Image (cartoon, rainbow, N blue to C red):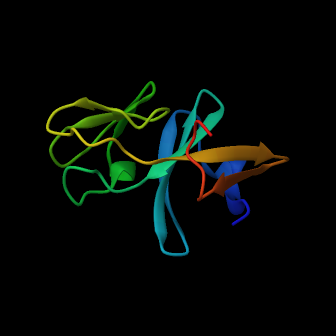
Amino acid sequence: MAETLVCPVSEIAENTVKRFEIGTNVLAVYNIDGEFYVTDDECTHAAASLADGMLEGETIECALHFGAFNVKTGEAVQAPCFTPLRTYKVAVRGDNVYVDLEKEAGD
């Protein structure tokens, strides 16, 4: 699968996160100091949207049980979350954010 258009860059204010549905995938798209990152939107601990959580630096805290993940790596950094979050490869071209749903952020 090739890259998929997610949204215009202007749709996500700096240092915020927003939820998007791309086909059957529900994604959280983060703008951290002008750099974009994409993870699964659902917390690995419980069925909660991470886009509803608190973004502090590169850490997203789940609003349901306050577990947290590193947005860049997907690493669970605060209990009760222990299972890593899936990350995706992101490209910004022109004024748009694209995601490759078949590649991890580090690929």
Q: Quadrant of residue 42?
A: bottom left
Q: Residue furthest right?
A: 94
27 shown above or below 16? below
Horizontally, residue 5 falls left or right of residue 53, namely right
Pinpoint residue 10: horizontal percent, then vertical percent: 69, 48
Looking at the rendered image, the quarter that the C terminus falls into is top right
Looking at the rendered image, the quarter that the N terminus falls into is bottom right
Pinpoint residue 37: horizontal percent, then vertical percent: 57, 41
Q: Quadrant of residue 13?
A: top right
Image mark count: 0
Pinpoint residue 50: horizontal percent, then vertical percent: 35, 49
In the image, what residue occupies the spot 40% across and 55% down? 41
In the image, what residue occupies the spot 14% across and 38% down? 80
In the image, what residue occupies the spot 64% across and 52% down? 11
Q: Nearer the viewer, residue 53 or 6?
A: 6
